[in-house]
Image (cartoon, rainbow, N blue to C red):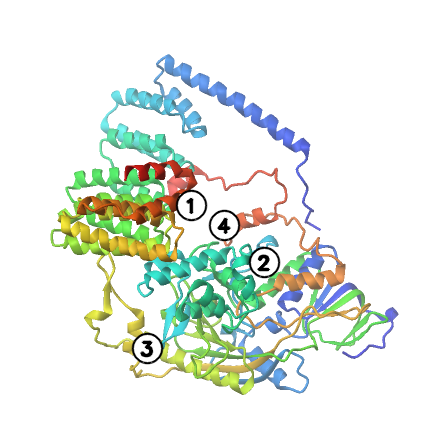
């Protein structure tokens, strides 16, 4: 028979593992000491670079070491011609890619990548866009990725002189259709819409706003618990960056949306976001119409204190301000 | 079965357990027993594996038809009518006698992975589930994204559907919601408790739950609906799979192979003709005698229930790719109750394209079934067949023109136009196809059900296993196998409780599945969670943009 019955991990095996880990900790501390001493001595040699490589592979969050690494590279690059710098930067980018796969949400890795592109004699924006697209495929909600994407797109636009607003806008649509619980995608959309409407003046801004409101309403009704869709809705209703609505138009819009959310509240009476949004929009409307605050708002705030006790004081404050 | 008069002394062979019939459940038990050290002799009267679950080539199918219609029929099948067009290469077809799909969230898949039998098989995804509504096939919304992007559901319907989906994922815990409807029809529960409309109820019941009727009790139905929805979360985009060359038969063969590796002995073409309870001697048609120390598990069960399922197999000269999702080669179509002139049970259709390995390219196999007997069953299957024929001719025809009115077009936020499929159905209702569909094979037959495991009389060595279930998805296979296993060994504690030797990582099974396996079967809390260690340099080098 080839097969063996499963054995349980013995206390002995656990002790073994603890001993191994203690050894690793001693090793790590020694490495850190070595690197920091090297920096104190202003050691900017390739050997020092290797040291930082080893340390950063283990702990990419140690941002001081990334700083040191940049000091080393800057010093090395001083003596080198552009092609050598480019080739070194490319190696650096490869190193960073591997780090990113393991730690996709580490600020310092993305930051160092940005530094590489700024230091590079001829950065490949196309490659970077492909990279960030791949990262967002792995995790569409990685805000580091979205932030970096905006940086790359900007770089690309500056290099080519061509606006990428339309394809980027369509990209957010694709991401949202795949999963609309994505604050970063909606956020990116808010950055793109004003530019889009500017770039394509043939778009009827009011009709566009209407279709966006329709889209977000689909999302709100599908998942009223999702924060990102409510925040996007609020931006659509209150922002002046899409289209300059007249006071009358704004009032009509608010009234229409209040009605729509009220219908949702009727079927989901305990929806925190429905109550909050209704309270907010009704207050906003009263400020425009100059009328007194509706008693229903007080009702919402009371209900909110019940269902969202963690923010009880906030609702109390709100009530006092009315 | 006749009793044998042989004595223990003139036996050619001995074994602990004799299993008669290489059906899926029997094969799982064979492997389970073999891996626990039992001496298993597994035989089948057919010259092929799989028994009632097998997929047959055309020659085997002809022989099978004759056997089923003969006086000595001991299969769960009856009334087979077969038409085969001339000039077909018999070996290029694998006709599945009991077509089934495998949901990704299922005991059977977990067992396949755990036992490594999955490595003998090639699985393909199945994510296209259609309901026949208003003369057209609507794709079923099964995820939050489907519901969000749907152009046909109203806002309030979207909310109701989502509320139900959230509930059903955890329905067992929320007894207060459904307890009073436990034995009531699921349609009543969905309407009264969740305010769902008829179209949504029909889709949930028929295409997501794969239930034969909306009258199914709520408790049973909720489990089936949950199965589909939670299966969508395993590999993403599709809730079910099938194996190449006919799922049931291939899975059975896989388990037989596993049993053989563990020491079980296999013999095809061996018919059992007698068994003596007192001496424990089994006699084969060849005259050989086998001494059985413990038990015989036989698939030639005699206890049948009244219910029948009527089946139809049609091989068509169309690839049917219009019905398949991108990258897939199969689809499911359900004709709900009352959509075919009064059918009281749904007609379920499994469409297998050539990508399934069951037929040559340019063709497809339509497997239809209805939980309705004989003449009535066949009648509804023929009506469904006509509708399928109309639909495929309509969707695959090249020179087709129709006028679309402005009102029938809606615009997505990104500016792309989309035609409402409901309205499309209306426009197309008057379409008359210029060509007709060529059928290369047509087979109809009925199948009876059995109960398993049938409680054997005390002290009896003979245990019967059940015939394949009527449902479109595999159901209770592992439970049935465990039941039989327990009747033999007295316990289920060591059922497949084996550490299989690790071969090289198999690419066929995704990391997600292995993760599930690790979580479900690792009872050692101190174990390191073994993540896949990336070789970074490799990844960087292979990156293509």
Q: Residues within 10 Å of mark 1 (few under 14, many from 20)?
A: few
Q: CA distance from mark 3 to mark 2?
A: 40 Å
The x and y percentages for residue B101 are 52, 66
Image mark for residue B394: 3
- At mark 3, the secondary structure is helix
Q: Residues within 10 Å of mark 4 (few under 14, many from 20)?
A: few
Q: Is residue B517 above or below residue B538?
A: below
- At mark 2, the secondary structure is helix
- At mark 1, the secondary structure is helix
The x and y percentages for residue A144 are 33, 37
Would you say B113 lies left or right of A282 here?
Answer: right
Q: CA distance from mark 2 to mark 1?
A: 39 Å
Quarter residue A293 falls in = top left
Q: Earlier in the sequence, mark 4 or mark 2?
A: 2
Q: Chain of mark 4?
A: B
Mark in the foreground, 2 or 1: 1
Identify residue for label 4.
Answer: B512
Q: Is residue A280 above or below residue B21?
A: above
């Amino acid at each position: 028979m080839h097969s063996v019955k499963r054995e349980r991990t013995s206390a002995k095996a656990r002790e073994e593992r603890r001993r191994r880990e203690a050894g690793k900790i001693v090793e790590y501390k020694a490495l850190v000491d070595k690197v920091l001493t090297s920096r104190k001595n202003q050691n900017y040699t390739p050997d020092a670079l290797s040291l930082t490589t080893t340390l950063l592979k283990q702990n990419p969050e140690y941002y001081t070491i990334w700083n040191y690494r940049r000091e080393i590279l800057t010093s090395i690059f001083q003596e080198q011609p552009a092609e050598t710098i480019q080739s070194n930067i490319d190696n650096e980018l490869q190193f960073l890619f591997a780090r990113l796969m393991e730690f996709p949400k580490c600020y310092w890795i993305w930051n160092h990548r940005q530094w590489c592109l700024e230091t590079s004699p001829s950065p490949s924006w196309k490659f970077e866009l492909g990279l960030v697209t791949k990262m967002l495929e792995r995790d569409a909600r990685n805000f580091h990725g979205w932030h970096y994407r905006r940086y790359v797109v900007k770089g690309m636009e500056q290099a080519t002189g061509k606006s990428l607003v339309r394809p980027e806008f369509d990209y957010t649509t694709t991401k949202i259709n795949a999963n609309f619980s994505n604050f970063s995608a909606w956020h990116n959309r808010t950055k793109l819409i004003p530019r889009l409407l500017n770039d394509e003046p043939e778009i009827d801004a009011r009709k566009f706003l209407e279709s966006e409101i329709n889209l977000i309403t689909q999302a709100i009704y599908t998942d009223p618990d999702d924060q990102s869709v409510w925040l996007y809705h609020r931006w659509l209703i209150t922002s002046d960056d899409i289209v300059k609505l007249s006071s009358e138009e704004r009032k009509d819009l608010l009234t229409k949306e209040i009605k729509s959310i009220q219908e949702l509240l009727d079927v989901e009476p305990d929806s925190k976001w429905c109550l909050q949004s209704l309270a907010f929009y009704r207050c906003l409307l009263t400020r425009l119409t100059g009328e007194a605050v509706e008693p229903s708002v007080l009702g919402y705030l009371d209900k909110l204190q019940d269902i969202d006790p963690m923010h009880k004081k906030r609702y109390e404050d709100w009530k006092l301000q009315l | 079965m006749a009793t044998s008069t042989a004595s223990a002394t003139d036996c050619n062979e001995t074994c602990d357990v004799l299993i008669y019939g290489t059906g899926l459940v029997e094969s799982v038990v064979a492997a389970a027993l073999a891996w626990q050290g039992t001496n298993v002799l597994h035989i089948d009267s057919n010259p092929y594996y799989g028994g009632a679950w097998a997929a047959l080539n055309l020659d085997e199918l002809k022989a099978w038809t004759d056997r089923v219609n003969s006086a000595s029929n001991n299969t769960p099948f009856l009334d087979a009518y077969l038409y085969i067009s001339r000039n077909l290469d018999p070996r290029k077809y694998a006709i599945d006698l009991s077509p089934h799909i495998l949901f990704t969230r299922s005991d059977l898949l977990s067992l396949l992975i755990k036992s490594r039998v999955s490595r003998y098989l090639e699985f393909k995804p199945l994510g296209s589930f259609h309901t026949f509504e208003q003369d057209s096939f609507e794709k079923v919304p099964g995820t939050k994204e489907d519901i969000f992007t749907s152009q046909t559901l109203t806002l309030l319907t979207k909310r109701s559907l989502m509320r139900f989906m959230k509930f059903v994922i955890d329905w067992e815990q929320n007894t207060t919601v459904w307890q009073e409807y436990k034995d009531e029809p699921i349609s009543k529960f969905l309407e009264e408790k969740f305010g769902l409309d008829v179209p949504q109820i029909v889709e949930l019941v028929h295409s997501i739950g794969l239930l034969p009727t909306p009258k199914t009790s709520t408790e049973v139905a909720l489990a089936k609906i949950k199965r589909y929805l939670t299966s969508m979360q395993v590999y993403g985009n599709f809730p079910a799979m099938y194996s190449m060359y006919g799922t049931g038969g291939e899975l059975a063969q896989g388990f037989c192979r596993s049993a053989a590796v563990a020491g079980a002995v296999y013999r095809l073409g061996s018919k059992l003709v007698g068994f003596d309870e007192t001496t424990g001697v089994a006699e084969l048609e060849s005259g050989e005698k086998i001494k059985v120390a413990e038990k015989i598990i036989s698939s030639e069960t005699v206890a049948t229930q009244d219910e029948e399922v009527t089946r139809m197999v049609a091989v068509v000269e169309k690839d049917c790719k219009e019905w398949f999702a991108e990258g897939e080669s199969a689809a499911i179509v359900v004709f709900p109750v009352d959509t075919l002139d009064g059918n009281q049970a749904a007609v379920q259709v499994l469409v297998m394209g050539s990508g399934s390995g069951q037929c040559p390219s340019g063709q497809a196999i339509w497997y239809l079934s209805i939980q309705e007997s004989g003449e009535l069953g066949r009648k509804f299957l023929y009506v469904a067949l006509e509708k399928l024929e109309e639909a495929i001719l309509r969707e695959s025809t090249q020179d087709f023109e129709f006028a679309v009115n402005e009102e029938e077009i809606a615009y997505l936020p990104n500016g792309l136009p989309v035609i409402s499929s409901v309205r499309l159905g209306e426009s197309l209702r008057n379409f008359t196809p210029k060509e007709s569909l060529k059928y290369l094979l047509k087979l109809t037959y009925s199948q009876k059900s059995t109960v398993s495991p049938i409680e054997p009389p005390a002290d009896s060595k003979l245990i019967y296993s059940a015939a394949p279930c009527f449902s479109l998805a595999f159901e209770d296979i592992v439970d049935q196998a465990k039941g039989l296993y327990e009747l033999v060994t007295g316990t289920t504690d060591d059922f497949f409780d084996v550490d299989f030797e690790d071969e090289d990582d198999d690419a066929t099974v995704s990391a997600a599945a292995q993760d599930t396996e690790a979580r479900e079967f690792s009872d050692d809390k101190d174990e390191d969670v073994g993540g896949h260690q990336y070789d970074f340099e490799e990844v960087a080098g292979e990156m293509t943009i």
